[in-house]
Each structure stands twice: as C-alpha cells, then as structure tokens.
Amino acid sequence: MLSANLWYNLAFIALSAVTLVSALMVVSMKDMVRCAVFLSFSFIGVAGLYILLHAEYLAMIQVLVYVGAVTVLIIFAIMLIPQAARRMMTESATQRLTGGMVGLLVFMLLVSVLLRFNWSPRPGADAQPPMEALRTFSMQLLSTYLIPFEVASVVLLVALIGAIVLAKEEQNAA
Amino acid sequence: MLQAYLLIGAALFCIGIYGVLTRRNAVGILMSIELMLNATNINLVAFWRFIQPFGFIPTKPADPFTGQIFAIFVITIAAAEAAVGLAIILCIYRNMEHINVDEINFLRW
C-alpha cells in the first residue's frame, strides 16, 4: 500500500514537472515550431495528471483534441506564415520584466489563498471509481447536460463556418 | 493531495499569463491562452476528484460527474476558439504581412 502511494507521488511529480517545464519552454522559446512541439508535451503531461485523477476518459479526450487537433492546427498556421514573421517573436526586456512580475504576483496571490484554506477532501475520495463510471458519465452528459451538449455542437458548427469564411482567400482582389 | 494539484494549476495559469503579456506574436499568445485553459481544467478535475467523489459515498450526489463534464465543455470551446483565432491570425497576416500584435492598429472607432 505504501509503495503504491510512493509510485503515485513519483508519477505526480514527474508528470507535473513535464507539464510545467514544457509550459515554460512554450513561453520562452524563440522558434514558434519548437513552441508548438513543447505545447504538445505540456498537453500530454496534463493528460497524465487526468489519469492520476481517475479521469481516464478526459485524458483520452485531451490527447485526441489537444495533442491531435489543436497542436496540429497551430503547426499548420505556423507553416502558412513564412519564416520572416515566424522569427519576429523577440520581446523587450521591460516586457519580460513586467510580464514576469505580474505572473509572479498572481501566483503568490493564488498560493497564499490556497495555503490559507483547509481543503479537506470528502470521505470516499481515496476509493477507486466504480466499473460503470463511464456509463454514468455518459448518462449524465446526455440527460442533465443535454442542452449544453447540443449547444456545443452548434458552437462548433459556427466556429467551423467562421474559420472557413475568415481564412478564405478573397476572390475579388483584382 | 488536492493542494498539490491546485498548486500545479496555479503555476500553469501564471506561466500562461506571462506568455500572454510578453509575446508579441499572435500565435504565441494563442498558445499561452491554451496553457491557461489547461490550468483551469486541472483545477476543475481536481476539485471533482477530491471534493465531489464518484457517487458511491453514503450521500449519493445527483450528478456525480459534473466537474469532468465542465472540463469537457471547456475543451470543446477551446478547440473552437483555437480554430477561429488561427483563422483571424491568417487573415491579419494576409493583410499586414506580419502578426505582431503591438503593431496591429487598424481598428477604427
């Protein structure tokens, strides 16, 4: 039991390290293609954290949607923008200083709030999920949250049409 | 354990804030926004796991998976936002030959 707990902690530390280090690379690298690749590593780390949290279905969705679709979309967009614009990511030192200070300030605020509150988990939080968890999950998604589910499909359709309209070449350029 | 997850979420969110504030490239800003959305998702799932467990506890909640479903909706909206955002960036690039957000000032009022 103790060794299982140890493995859990080790996995948690490794996955959060992957997530945070890749995220730092995303915001500090010069080349946008490398940023996109590190972004996918960060997403994979978050998917691992979901598995540790017993949200396996969400981890699968994370890999499919974020690693499989969003990152590829970003890489496609970078490829459509020539090299010259790609390299123009240099920030000034004042920008970095201001951004770092604001980020650190927000982080310190959040941490002070986190440490002040007594987060006692509910009883039963350590237990394994029941076998029919995914079934309950889909039942809930398609009964209680049916209307948001349908609205999400409309949102996706609108986003699809909007993206096509925006990205289309203008025909009457001449 | 919940605190550790919340700490990771907070750190990821602040890295995203740093990226949004420092990047001049619009695609870089979009990537940082994705990082921030992931941080909120970690928080949602962690709260779901530790504050509202699976629904086999004595007082069975009516909707045991609300946190995860919220996270799924966040992922859906994030995907739509990425698609529309990248299309807008392509459109701007076609008009202005660059995507530096501090030089894009053709909005009129």
Image (cartoon, coloured by chain):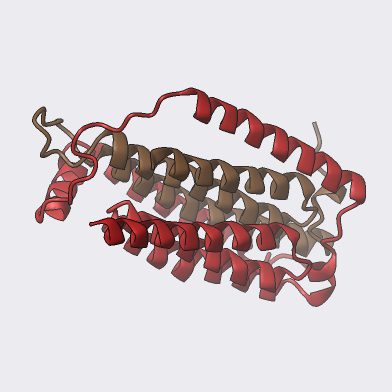
Chain colours: A red, B brown
Number of on-image labels: 0
The residue drawn where x is 23% and y is 41% is B65
Q: Quadrant of residue B105?
A: top right
Give percent across and percent down for residue A151.
33, 42
Give percent across and percent down for residue A113.
54, 25
Residue B92 vertical placement versus B59 (above, below): below
Quarter the C terminus of chain A occupies: bottom right
Name the side, left or right, on which A112 lies relative to A134: right
Give percent across and percent down for residue B95.
79, 60
Query: Which residue is more in the foreground, B48 or B92?
Result: B48
Residue A169 vertical placement versus A121 (above, below): below
* Residue A118 visible here: yes
Name the side, left or right, on which A85 lies relative to B65: right
Residue B26 vertical placement versus A117 (above, below): below
Residue A7 vertical placement versus B61 (above, below): below
Name the side, left or right, on which A87 lies relative to B17: right
Query: Which residue is more in the foreground, B59 or A169?
Result: B59
Give percent across and percent down for residue B103.
87, 50
